[in-house]
């Protein structure tokens, strides 16, 4: 072909173009425009995918797929949202009272016993005896002391036990008086107003004249324990 000059080469192309027997061209003006648009779209998608990949590498997050053909397994790290990075809110705290009880290991008190509901006062009230055994475990199981047959008002409650503390022996007595009843304290007794509006009286006496009474030094603490529960 090096022996053919430019004029001869041009003549050959013109002859081929004018040949009526040659096949029609495989593309026209519209097909060229469509091919150009597809090429432009591909370039834009590639540029967008590259921008997402660069942006994702700058942060920390979860994996997402880049734009591409179905089944493409390529992934990049997408940035984590501000909400994902925010710390979790603290759980609501208990009320101040509940927190204090938990710290002290003290459970809330049950409703106070209040006045009795029998025709005559129970001089050996089981509910009061249970409270006395709690505050004075030393008398748990101690025998009940003898009481008079006097019918006291039904709102009253009482306990009387034969108590001993070391060498000291005698009678330990607890009496609950309902609201409105005036208390008459025996010698050495202590009293406290109760949660139900009544009065609790705790006393101790020796079985021997002149000897120390059992639990005489703990009567005040016993009354303080029983007061919110009666």
Image: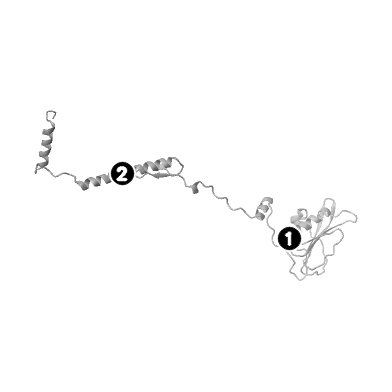
Q: Residue at x 31, y 44 (%)?
A: 42
Relative to 129, 24 lies left or right: left
SS type, badge 1: helix
Q: CA distance from mark 2 to mark 1?
A: 85 Å
Q: Is residue 39 above or below residue 216?
A: above
Residue that badge 2 annotates: 42
> To which quarter of the image does residue 41 belong?
top left
Relative to 173, 79 lies left or right: left
Task: Report whether residue 53 is seen.
Answer: yes
Depth check: 197 or 2 in front? 2
Residue 184 screen position, x and y as percent: 85, 64
Residue 60 screen position, x and y as percent: 46, 42
Task: Report whether residue 73 is seen.
Answer: no
Name the mark on residue 128: none
Kindly report which numbered mark, 2 or 1, lies closer to the viewer in this rendering.
2
Task: Assign the C terminus to one quadrant of the image.
Answer: bottom right
Mark 2 crowdedness (10 Å alpha carbons): few <14, some 14-19, many ≥20: few
SS type, badge 2: helix
Depth check: 187 or 195 in front? 195
Total labels: the figure holds: 2
Mark 1 crowdedness (10 Å alpha carbons): few <14, some 14-19, many ≥20: some
- Closer to the chain start, of discs 2 and 1, is 2
Q: List the single residue furthest toward the top.
A: 3
Relative to 10, 55 lies left or right: right
> To which quarter of the image does residue 190 belong?
bottom right
Q: Is residue 26 above or below residue 107?
A: above
Q: Residue at x 10, y 36 (%)?
A: 11
Task: Assign the N terminus to one quadrant of the image.
Answer: top left
Residue that badge 1 annotates: 229
Depth check: 3 or 150 in front? 3
Residue 162 screen position, x and y as percent: 81, 58
Q: List the single residue furthest toward the bottom.
A: 119
């Amino acid at each position: 072909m090096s022996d053919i000059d430019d004029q001869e080469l041009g003549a050959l192309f013109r002859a081929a173009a004018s040949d009526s027997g040659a096949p029609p061209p495989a593309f026209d003006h519209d097909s060229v425009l469509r091919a150009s648009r597809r090429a432009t779209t591909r370039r834009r998608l590639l540029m967008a995918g590259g921008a997402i990949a660069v942006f994702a590498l700058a942060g920390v997050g979860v994996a997402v797929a880049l734009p591409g053909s179905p089944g493409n397994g390529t992934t990049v790290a997408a940035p984590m949202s501000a909400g994902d990075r925010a710390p979790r809110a603290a759980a609501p705290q208990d009320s101040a009272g509940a927190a204090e009880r938990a710290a002290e290991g003290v459970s809330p008190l049950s409703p106070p016993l209040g006045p009795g509901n029998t025709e005559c006062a129970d001089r050996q009230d089981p509910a009061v005896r249970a409270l006395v055994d709690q505050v004075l475990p030393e008398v748990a199981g101690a025998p009940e002391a003898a009481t008079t047959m006097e019918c006291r008002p039904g709102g009253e409650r009482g306990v009387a036990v034969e108590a001993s503390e070391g060498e000291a022996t005698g009678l330990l007595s607890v009496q609950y008086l309902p609201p409105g009843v005036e208390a008459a304290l025996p010698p050495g007794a202590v009293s406290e107003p109760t949660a139900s509006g009544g009065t609790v009286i705790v006393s101790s006496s020796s079985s021997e004249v002149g000897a120390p009474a059992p639990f005489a030094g703990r009567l005040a603490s016993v009354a303080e324990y029983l007061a919110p529960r009666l």
